[in-house]
């Protein structure tokens, strides 16, 4: 199994982090250059690999994780499915609404999973602090 225990670690964790970074760059700096094209190809290829790794992780999440983690992994699965649809439909102007839904689901899933990780790793001590962390991360994500 790709994700035998709680949380994200190893290759899958690094891949998820790099996908989030590439998404920020692709959204913030659209440009017709080779770096942008390379990032698109990385994001598509890495997204497909992450979608495959997500299947066993999603099953594991529903067996032994918190509600926030379950919601986060479910939203990430929806974002992955939308990403796969975008691969086949393309992201021409007519499909931008679908692209924005993909971005919203991935961003909210990332916020939930990061807040859950902070809680489980002991960096955030209480449930109230976890909620406050989720709100702060969501506001920061929207501000970007």
Image: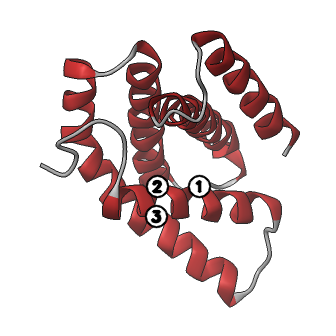
Question: Compared to 109, does 29 lie above or below?
Answer: below
Viewer-proximal residue among 85 and 138 = 138
User: At 19% across and 29% down in the image, what residue appears?
Assistant: 59
Question: Compared to 99, does 23 lie above or below?
Answer: below
Question: Compared to 32, does 78 lie above or below?
Answer: above
Q: Residue furthest bottom?
A: 34
In terms of image quadrants, where is residue 128? top right
Label 1 with label 2: CB-CB less than 8 Å: yes
As drawn, the label of residue 44 is 3
Q: CA distance from mark 1 to mark 3?
A: 12 Å
Helix, strand or loop under label 1: helix
Q: Residue furthest right?
A: 143
User: At 72% across and 65% down in the image, what residue appears?
Assistant: 25
Q: CA distance from mark 2 to mark 3?
A: 12 Å
Q: Which residue is mark 2?
A: 16
User: At 18% across and 40% down in the image, what residue appears?
Assistant: 56
Where is residue 16 drawn, in percent x and y? Answer: 46, 55
Disc number lying in front (1 or 3): 1
Q: Residues within 10 Å of mark 3 (few under 14, many from 20)?
A: some
Q: Which residue is mark 1?
A: 20
């Amino acid at each position: 199994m790709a994700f035998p225990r709680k949380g994200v670690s190893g290759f899958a964790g690094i891949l998820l982090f790099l996908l989030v970074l590439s998404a920020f760059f692709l959204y913030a700096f659209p440009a017709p250059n080779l770096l942008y094209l390379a990032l698109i190809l990385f994001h598509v290829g890495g997204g497909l690999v992450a979608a495959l790794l997500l299947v066993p992780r999603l099953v594991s999440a529903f067996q032994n994780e918190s509600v926030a983690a379950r919601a986060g992994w479910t939203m990430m699965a929806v974002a992955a499915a939308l990403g796969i649809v975008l691969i086949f439909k393309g992201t021409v102007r007519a499909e931008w609404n679908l692209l924005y839904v993909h971005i919203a689901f991935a961003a909210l899933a990332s916020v939930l999973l990061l807040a859950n990780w902070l809680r489980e790793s002991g960096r955030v001590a209480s449930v109230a602090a976890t909620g406050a962390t989720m709100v702060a991360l969501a506001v920061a994500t929207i501000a970007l």
